[in-house]
């Protein structure tokens, strides 16, 4: 049973590391951004509701986002744990997740805070913009997303720090080095991985 969050600014590499760490602990990596993008490309009702919001780099309303996450966490593969990437993203969503987990008599084991200097994250994002062409990776939209991260998302770390569950990880290095740092921090909390890395 391992229940994790990974939090970090755009360009911190949280998506990549989230997938790696989830695999090491045998739990699903659940990314709200990936779920929303899949809904948009699939043309579902949800996709139609969130398309313009994502393209502007704004936050999807909490009620909708939290409902999507609750549905996903209710699936069988998340019964033994999960790693959430990109959720919660503000204090309202922290409250929603707390209420959901309390209802299941569960709690978070650790919050991975992935930090990179601003220059580094901006250069990674412009590289990603060239490689992947994500519609929300234009200069203007990136600035909006980073601003929202600083104003709304960074404060959630204070809440989790007070609970003593935050592991601050240096996000500069090779992918393997960063993954090892995260795994070492989680193992130091007594969390047990299921796969060799
Ligand atoms: P990034 O972290 O690079 O901004 P994500 O893939 O995590 O990318 O998210 C992409 C977009 O999806 C966000 O800009 C936002 O519009 C939407 N989104 C993702 N997660 C949430 C969330 N927890 N609450 C509200 N909106 C979200």
Image (cartoon, grey):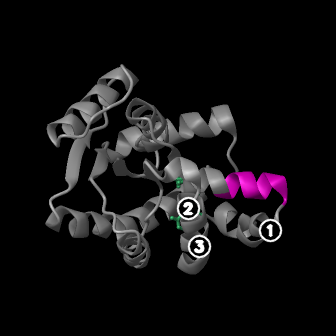
Residue occupying the point 24% across, 64% down? 160
130 lies left or right of 95: right
How far from the left and from the top, in percent, is residue 98? 36, 73
Badge 1 marks a residue whose secondary structure is helix
Along the polypeptide, which appears first: circle 3 or circle 1?
Answer: 1
Q: Is residue 42 magenta?
A: yes
Give residue 108's quadrant in the image.
Answer: bottom left
Position of residue 44 measured from the top left corner of the image (x, y, whole percent): 82, 63
Q: Tell me the magenta residue range.
A: 36-43
Quadrant location, ligand no. 1: bottom right
Q: In front: 158, or 82?
A: 82
Q: Is residue 179 magenta?
A: no
The rendered magenta stretch, by its main secondary structure, is classed as: helix
Q: Callout 1 environment at 10 Å: few (<14), some (14 to 19), or many (20+)?
A: some
Comparing marks 3 and 1, which lies closer to the viewer?
3
What residue lies at 27% left-to-right and 32% top-to-bottom?
183
Residue 70 figure quarter: bottom right
Q: Say the numbered circle drawn on residue 67.
A: 3
Disc 2 from disc 1: Cα separation:
23 Å
Where on the picture, by quarter, is residue 127?
Answer: top right
Q: Are marks 3 and 1 in contact (CB under 8 Å)?
A: no
Q: Which residue is mark 2?
A: 74
Look at mark 1 in the image and give the residue it sits on.
48
Badge 2 crowding class, 10 Å Cα cut-off, few under 14, some 14 to 19, many 20 or more, is few
């Amino acid at each position: 049973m391992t229940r994790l969050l990974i939090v970090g600014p755009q360009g911190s590499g949280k998506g990549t590391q989230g997938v790696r760490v989830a695999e090491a602990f045998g739990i699903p990596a659940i990314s709200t951004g990936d779920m929303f993008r899949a809904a948009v490309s699939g043309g579902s009702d949800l996709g139609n509701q969130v398309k313009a919001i994502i393209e502007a780099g704004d936050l999807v309303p909490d009620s909708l986002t939290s409902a999507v996450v609750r549905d996903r966490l209710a699936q069988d593969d998340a019964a033994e744990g999960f790693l959430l990437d990109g959720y919660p993203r503000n204090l309202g969503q922290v409250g929603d997740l707390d209420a959901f987990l309390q209802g299941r008599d569960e709690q978070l084991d650790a919050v991975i805070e992935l930090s990179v200097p601003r220059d580094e994250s901006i250069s990674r994002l412009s590289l990603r913009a060239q490689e992947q062409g994500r519609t929300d990776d234009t200069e203007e939209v990136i600035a909006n997303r980073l601003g929202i991260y600083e104003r709304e998302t960074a404060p959630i770390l204070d809440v989790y720090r007070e609970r003593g569950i935050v592991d601050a990880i240096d996000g500069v290095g090779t992918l393997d080095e960063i993954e090892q740092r995260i795994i070492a921090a989680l193992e130091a909390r007594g969390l047990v991985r299921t796969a060799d890395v």
